Image (cartoon, rainbow, N blue to C red):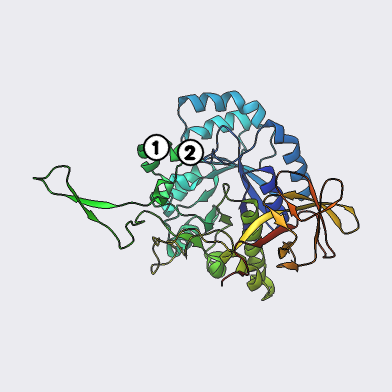
Amino acid sequence: MSVELLSPAGSIEKLRLALAYGADAAYLGLSDFSLRTNAKNFSASDLETVKEMKRESGKKLYCTMNMLFDEGRIARLKEQLPEIRQWPFDGYIISDLGLVNILRNGLGESVELHLSTQASCTNSESAALYHDLGFKRVILGRETPLSDIRAIKERNPDLELEVFVHGAMCMAYSGRCLLSTFMTGRSANQGDCAHSCRWKYRLALEEMEREGHYLPISEEDGYTTILSSADLCMIDHLQELVDSGVSSLKIEGRMKSSYYVAVVTRAYRKALDALTTGDPSWLEYRKDLFAVSHRQYSTGFFFPSDRGTITEEPYDRSYLFCGLFEEEVEPGIWSIELKNQLRSDMVLEYVTFSVPSIEDRGFTLLDEQFNVVEQADHPKRYYLKTDKCVAPGAIIRRPSRPHERART
């Protein structure tokens, strides 16, 4: 069985790009039941568009229902089952076992269930139990080392295993964190994490006889980031993951930008295909992983030598996502969906699935009346004239700092 590349889709645009840039499947959340409530998510108004995209692509779609449900949300889920049944989902990602019977009763006994990483399944006995309960796939806890993944698969050969290969990590075990709830009242386990672990902290020492008098314990720059985990990047270890028996490689990032979804999906698609073809060109696409917004990378918990690195580095990026090509309205003139400012004196790059990047120094910006302009600003309508070979869905980007290029 070929290994599935699974990408995040926090909106219609991200879903379209994930499928166009190489994903075999995408995971998305419905507005009321997603563990990423700050993503745009999907509602009834998106249903027909998602159905059409499903028909055209023939790729799989998984619905994330992986939050912890209270009584109110359980009641709403039961009420909305008739509407949920209309969605073209191939499977449902859940962590709350109370949903097993609810989904079976409401969607049919044959409903495909995937166990969320939130359930912290990290051993073969737990995996076997979930398989007996009817789960087709287990998304292993991110703490599971590669050696244990092999053992879990050997003892559960008929169970599909899914692992995260790229994206943000959580300092809490399987992402079950109460820090955000305690500090802000926003529950990470109900989709509203404030990412408190990314904040800057100072430590202090209080002497018992001097209550309220604190002596600082700090780094030289005045703060420390002891809770902030490095991002995960396993693109250089895909063969080892495939050999371990996993069925699906998952990219984190429903709340990341459309640009992130496209270029990260593309990089992993090229790298995964290269395992079969031996094509070395995937290394050109790999460079984008170091140009997209990210923290310091690590291999998470897969290997004993690198166990969930903590990083003091902030987010870093080399490019700014400026927009998307929509339709060629006249030869060489394209309507564009603008995301960030463009100026005629900039150097632009265009990104497609099959070409790492195309540099353009000779483009022309046009306004709604097709008059030449020197600057284009969101959210107005603009057109871009170019002699470069692009296509609908091609990405427009520019260096985030002048003359900057991606680091490898």
Number of other residues with Cα within 10 Å of mark 1, as a class: few under 14, some 14 to 19, many 20 or more: few
Q: Which residue is drawn at 37% across and 52% down?
A: 200
- Which-is-in-front pick, marks 1 and 2? 1
At which x and y percent is residue 194? 45, 42
Whether label 1 touches label 2, CB < 8 Å: no
Q: Distance between the residues labelled 1 and 2?
A: 10 Å
Amino acid residing under circle 2: Asp
Q: Tag 1, which secondary structure?
A: helix
- In depth, the one of 380 and 120 nearer the eye is 380
- In depth, the one of 383 and 194 nearer the eye is 383
At which x and y percent is residue 258? 65, 51
Is any atom of residue 221 visible in this view?
A: yes
Looking at the image, tell me whether mark 1 or mark 2 is earlier in sequence order. Answer: 1
Say which quadrant the C terminus sits in.
bottom right
Q: Which residue in the protein does label 1 denote? A: 184
Name the mark on residue 69.
Answer: none
Is 3 situated left or right of 392 in this image?
left
Q: Residue at x 63, y 47 (%)?
A: 9
- In depth, the one of 141 and 399 nearer the eye is 399
